[in-house]
Amino acid sequence: MPNSSSISEFLLLPLADTRQLQRLHFWLLLGIYLAALLGNGLISTAIACDRRLHTPMYFFLLNLALLDLGCISTTLPKAMANALWDTRAISYAGCAAQIFFFYFFISAEYSLLTIMSYDRYIAICKPLHYGTLMDSRACATMAAAAWGAGLLYSLLHTASTFSLPLCQGNVVNQFFCEIPQILKLSCSDSNLREVVLIIFSGSLSFGCFVFIVVSYVQIFLAVLRMPSEQGRHKAFSTCLPHLTVVSLFLSTGFFAYLKPPSISSPLLDLTVSLLYSVFPPTLNPIIYGMRNRDVKHALSRVLQYTLLHLL
């Protein structure tokens, strides 16, 4: 069997067995990818151009849209190219880059969603201190911390994974490169460094999850104590999009990585990987755009401005 020094490329899992289905999958993925680019691009443009949206909540939403763009651009273009040209190959360097960027964007997004729950907690539970605790410098620092945490997490895991000797072939049972599939190609059943990193990252992920849950428990208690029905509705309307995005992100990701091995199969793994790597970046702008009146108004103004100058 080849070792890691002799592997020049990996073979990814094809999306279909026939050319007709591969072409169909190409057009489906292209439609999803363009929808994600359009949705996240419009959200980013609206927030950047509308000064009324230059607030902490929308600043973090802008970062979320950029992370979603990066995440889906890491996996789908290569999958579409493979489906279009009937190939499975990805270079060794390309596979390493795909793992690095995917885990960078996905972990930074999780950190950012945790920060966004803190932002909602301060806005609703401590409104008098919101301007002090969430000033522009604090927001920039927290956003930079989310991106930095994603960078460090991805760098450590990618370096640890590709330092292992690989002698179980070069076939990756996934439509993109991911760490669990590369570890299956390792010569050893386990690696102490990777086990330690997984335990450490799992602890951090669980800590973020607990923080989000505790924040929303406090938020709901504060909202229920509000005397005004209009105030309760406004508070819920600002929290529901974020809560929906968090639920979609965590449910698909947890099922992908924590599902029992007894129910694992190539088709199920492929379906689940599409759910957690493709659906959240595509649906996030729809969730925020449809549930947030300020974003919808900003988007309409951007579209009107664009059409006016085009015509």
Image (cartoon, rainbow, N blue to C red):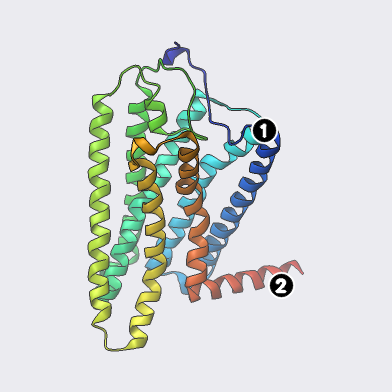
Q: Amino acid at mark 2?
A: Leu
Q: Is residue 174 above or below residue 67?
A: above
Q: Determine whether, in the image, residue 143 is placed left or right of residue 170.
A: left
Q: Residue at x 34, y 62 (%)?
A: 116
Q: How many residues crowd mark 2 within 10 Å: few (<14), some (14–19), many (20+)?
A: few
Q: Mark 1 vs mark 2: give the one in front.
A: 1
What count of labels does the image hold?
2
The local secondary structure at tag 1 comes to loop
34 or 100: nearer the viewer: 34
State the image quarter where residue 24 is shown.
top right
The local secondary structure at tag 2 comes to helix
State the image quarter where residue 86 is shown.
top right
Q: Is residue 124 above or below residue 288?
A: below
Residue 143: image x %, image y %? Answer: 36, 55
Residue 18 - label: 1
- Asked if disc 1 and disc 2 are in contact, CB closer than 8 Å, the reply is no
Q: Residue at x 34, y 87 (%)?
A: 229
The reply to whether residue 195 is visible in this rendering is yes
Q: Quadrant of the C terminus?
A: bottom right
Residue at the disc numbered 2: 308
